[in-house]
C-alpha cells in the first residue's frame, strides 16, 4: 500500500455480503476491527490496512518506480529476494485511525445482534462510535444481519476455501433479495445515494431471511478446483 491507498469492503451499502475472501480476511483482523469494517464498509488507508492484516508493506508512491525496477533486476530470482527487496523499500506509513478507536470498537461489536451493536455504539459516548451507528442505519438491514453471521462463521472456519463456499452461498442468496438491485441503482446507476431497502428496518428482517444466506443455492455449491 501507499499513502494513496484506499481499502474497503463496502458491500453492505449495495445490499451484499463481503465476498472474494473478504469475510475470511476481515474475520482475522485484531479484535473486532474486521466486524466494524465489514458492517460499515469504512474506507481505510495504509496504516489501518497494515494493522488489519490487509497489506504487508507500505511503500511511498514516489518510490514505486524504483521498486518496480529493483524487482525486475537480475538479482531478484526467488521469493525470498522479492520479500527482501520490498522490505528494503518499505517504511512506516502515516498514522491511521483504527488503533485509537480499538477500545470502543472492541466493546461494541461483540454484541449478539446488529441492533445491540448499534445500541452500544450510540451509548458509548464516543463521537466516532455514534458516526458508525449512523452509517449502519444507512446500510441494507438484510445485508447487515447476513454479514454479521458470515463474519462470525468465517472466524470459526479453518480454511479460505471453506469461507469462499459460504460467500458464494451468500452472493447467490443476495440475487433473490431486492436490496442488491436497489443498492446498485442508488450507488452506481442513479447515484442518488438514497436506497429504498426492503425491508427497511432491522426488526423486520426475519431469521429465515438471514438463514437463506447460509443455505446451499438451488444450483448447488461452488465446486473448487483441486490441485
Image (tube, rainbow, N blue to C red):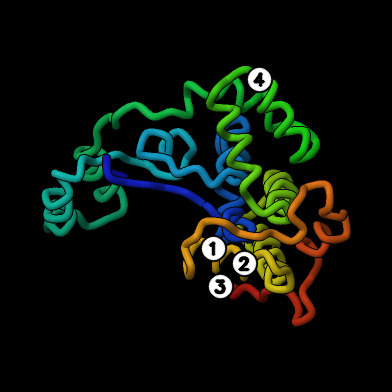
Is 61 placed above or below 72 here?
above
Nearest to the eye among marks 4 and 1: give it.
1
Mark sitting earlier along the chain (4/1): 4
Per the model, the C-alpha gap separating discs 4 and 1 is 31 Å
Per the model, the C-alpha gap separating discs 3 and 4 is 49 Å
Q: Are marks 1 and 2 in contact (CB under 8 Å)?
A: yes
Mark sitting earlier along the chain (1/3): 1
Q: Residue 212 vs residue 129: left or right? A: right
Location of residue 205 (image quadrant): bottom right
Per the model, the C-alpha gap separating discs 3 and 2 is 39 Å
Please report the residue visible at 47 percent of the width from the left and 24 percent of the height from the top. 99
**What is the quadrant of the C terminus in the image?**
bottom right
Query: Helix, strand, or loop for circle 4?
Result: loop
Query: Helix, strand, or loop for circle 3?
Result: loop
| Label placed on residue 186 | 1
- Callout 3: 10 Å neighbours few (<14), some, many (20+)? few
Mark sitting earlier along the chain (3/2): 2
Q: Which residue is mark 2?
A: 182
Q: Which residue is mark 3?
A: 227
Please report the residue visible at 24 percent of the width from the left and 37 percent of the height from the top. 90
Q: Which residue is mark 4?
A: 124
Amino acid at each position: 500500500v501507499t499513502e494513496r491507498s484506499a481499502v474497503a469492503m463496502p458491500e453492505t451499502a449495495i445490499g451484499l455480503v463481503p465476498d472474494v475472501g473478504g469475510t475470511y480476511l476481515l474475520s482475522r483482523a485484531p479484535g473486532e476491527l474486521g466486524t466494524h469494517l465489514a458492517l460499515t464498509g469504512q474506507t481505510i488507508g495504509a496504516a489501518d490496512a497494515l494493522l488489519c492484516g490487509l497489506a504487508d508493506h507500505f511503500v511511498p508512491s514516489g518510490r514505486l518506480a524504483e521498486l518496480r525496477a529493483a524487482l525486475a533486476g537480475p538479482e531478484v530470482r526467488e521469493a525470498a529476494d522479492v520479500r527482501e527487496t520490498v522490505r528494503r523499500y518499505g517504511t512506516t506509513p502515516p498514522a491511521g485511525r483504527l488503533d485509537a478507536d480499538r477500545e470502543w470498537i472492541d466493546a461494541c461489536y461483540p454484541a449478539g445482534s446488529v441492533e445491540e451493536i448499534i445500541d452500544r455504539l450510540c451509548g458509548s459516548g464516543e463521537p466516532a462510535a455514534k458516526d458508525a451507528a449512523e452509517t449502519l442505519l444507512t446500510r441494507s438491514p438484510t445485508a447487515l444481519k447476513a454479514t454479521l453471521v458470515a463474519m462470525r462463521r468465517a472466524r470459526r472456519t479453518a480454511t479460505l476455501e471453506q469461507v469462499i463456499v459460504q460467500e458464494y452461498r451468500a452472493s447467490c442468496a443476495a440475487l433473490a433479495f431486492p436490496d442488491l438491485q436497489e443498492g446498485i441503482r442508488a450507488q452506481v446507476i442513479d447515484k442518488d445515494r438514497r436506497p429504498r431497502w426492503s425491508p427497511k428496518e432491522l426488526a423486520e428482517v426475519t431469521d429465515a431471511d438471514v438463514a437463506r444466506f447460509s443455505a446451499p443455492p438451488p444450483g448447488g455449491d461452488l465446486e473448487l478446483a483441486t490441485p
